[in-house]
Image: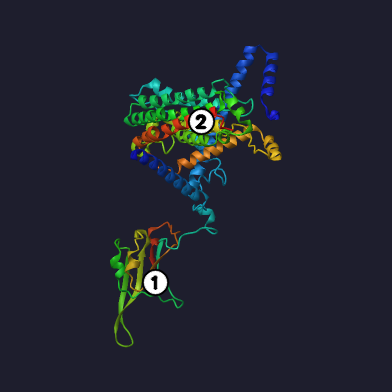
Amino acid sequence: MSTFKDYINGYAFGIKSLLIGMRTSMKVFMQKKITERYPENRHTTLYIPERHRAMLVMPKDENGNNKCIACGLCQMACPNGTIRITSETRETEDGKKKKFLVKYEYDLGACMFCQLCVNACPHDAIRFSNHFENAVFERDKLILTLNE
Amino acid sequence: MFDYYNLEPVLMWIHSTMCGLMPEWLAFTIEGIAVGIFIMVMYAVLAIILIYMERKVCAAFQCRIGPDRVGGRGGLLQVPADVIKILTKEIISLKNSDKFLYALAPFLVIMASILTFSCLPWNKGGEILHMNIGIFFVLAASSIGVLGILLAGWSSNSKYTLIGAVRSGAMIISYELSIGLSVLTMVILCGTMDIQEIVAYQENGWNIFKGHLPALMAFVIYLIAGNAEANRAPFDLAEAEQELTAGYHTEYSGMHFGFFYLAEYLNLFITAGIAVTLFLGGWMPLHIAGLEGFNTIMDYIPGVIWFVGKTFFVVFLLMWIRWTFPRLRIDQVLILEWKYLMPLSLLVLVIMTVMKVFGLVF
């Protein structure tokens, strides 16, 4: 008798779970669609999520200064050798020796957007922006200098 | 009551006029050719509409837009473009295949589908094949399709096609039982197998309301089993892409493949059309008892619009099922049929018989 009960229970459970599935897919059916009609809507309704990683940038404040301390952690963290930092040691007014960033080169063509450099940075000097239209005709143009 | 849309006098007038101009055999021949062309054209047009609808509905269920570029914003020319592409493709022939059966198989599949397609009641007096065992004929003719699938799988001489065909055969033959039993339930309710009379029986209420609970259950069973008959997901074992490349039509190309594809979509339409005929009143308009004005307005809508509209509604239900559920394994498919659907449809059959005998239906 209990097997018959199991059979009926299984039947009811199956129907219930199928109905839940159909309700879920109907919800998606009614949702706003996420497809972007790209070339037409690039100036109107195009939405790229904030966290999308398209290119490494170094934000500057209003005086044009960045937060980079030229520690080189990002360069060491990068698995592809995408980042090359040129730094020089200068003496500050109070006589301390300090590294200064001269050139921060970033090869967009070799970057795999793993975000290890951003995670490694102790001062949040670099971040990924969602500016994704980066196609160029020459490879050299992909090598960007971020601190300019 | 619906006489302003009855096609029969018009068709009889055409026939008698033609008989006046030429001998009767010639009139019959010309009419036959005209009806044949009409069926072919409808078949192609409906297939294009259904493929477009499938792509749009599937896209919506996956939170996408679907075809959008070819032919303006709606992507309306996408499917015609695909049809033209498939027409220009080469039909290859395989070295070690059974040439005759290989060429025959797609035609068997499409013939079965056209035969059942001709039985659909489009309008009052608008049925192409009319016979007093219509619904029985539909069941019989739709079974020819499985022969085509088996032959296609066997004659291609490839392990993928053979496995796909055998699976498909096992599945279709199993689900035929549930279809037969749920159709029989409605035949008991209506007391006739004639498709036009089944529709006429539903003049004062669709079967799904007349037969209430058992009819509703039979409707659901019919939809599930019909989905399996049409070889569509979640029952698309015959063409399980991951395991069998494309199943029974792996070795076909060009329009021969196109025939299988066409038949699949038209079988969807036919399944829906038969469901509408049996459960949702065919071309009968929706009537609500007590609302005379509403009923009169509904009567002014031609039957063909009712039929096509209801059919597309059922097609949408089937697509909803298709794009919701994951595919079943072959043993699960057979368990679903033999352990769940078949007992339930037998039970529904018994309940319906008892209710009919004791007059518990409306």
**Mark seen at residue A147:** 1
Q: Residues within 10 Å of mark 1 (few under 14, many from 20)?
A: some
Describe residue B23's horizontal placement relative to residue B243 as left or right. right
Q: Amino acid at mark 1?
A: Asn
In this rendering, the count of numbered labels is 2
Badge 2 sits on which subunit?
A: B
Rendered residue at 53%/25% (across/down): B135
- SS for tag 1? loop
Give the spatial CA distance, label 2 vs label 1: 81 Å
Q: Position of residue B265 (x, y in %)?
A: 49, 34
Describe residue B6's horizontal placement relative to residue B231 as left or right. right
Which corner quadrant of the image does residue A59 belong to?
bottom left
**Residue B268, placed above or below residue B30:** below
Rendered residue at 38%/21% (across/down): B99
Q: Position of residue B300 (x, y in %)?
A: 69, 35
Which corner quadrant of the image does residue A89 belong to?
bottom left
- SS for tag 2? helix
Using the image as rendered, state which of residue B74 and residue A19 is in the foreground: A19
Which quarter of the rendering shows the N terminus of chain B?
top right
**Residue B218 visible in rendering:** yes
Rendered residue at 60%/16% (across/down): B29
In the rendered image, which residue does mark 2 sit on? B352
Using the image as rendered, state which of residue A21 and residue A94 is in the foreground: A21
Q: Residues within 10 Å of mark 2 (few under 14, many from 20)?
A: many
Q: Amino acid at mark 2?
A: Met
Rendered residue at 55%/30% (across/down): B278
**Residue B257 visible in rendering:** no
Which quarter of the rendering shows the C terminus of chain B?
top right
Badge 1 sits on which subunit?
A: A
Q: Position of residue A94 (x, y in %)?
A: 32, 88
Q: Position of residue B332 (x, y in %)?
A: 36, 37
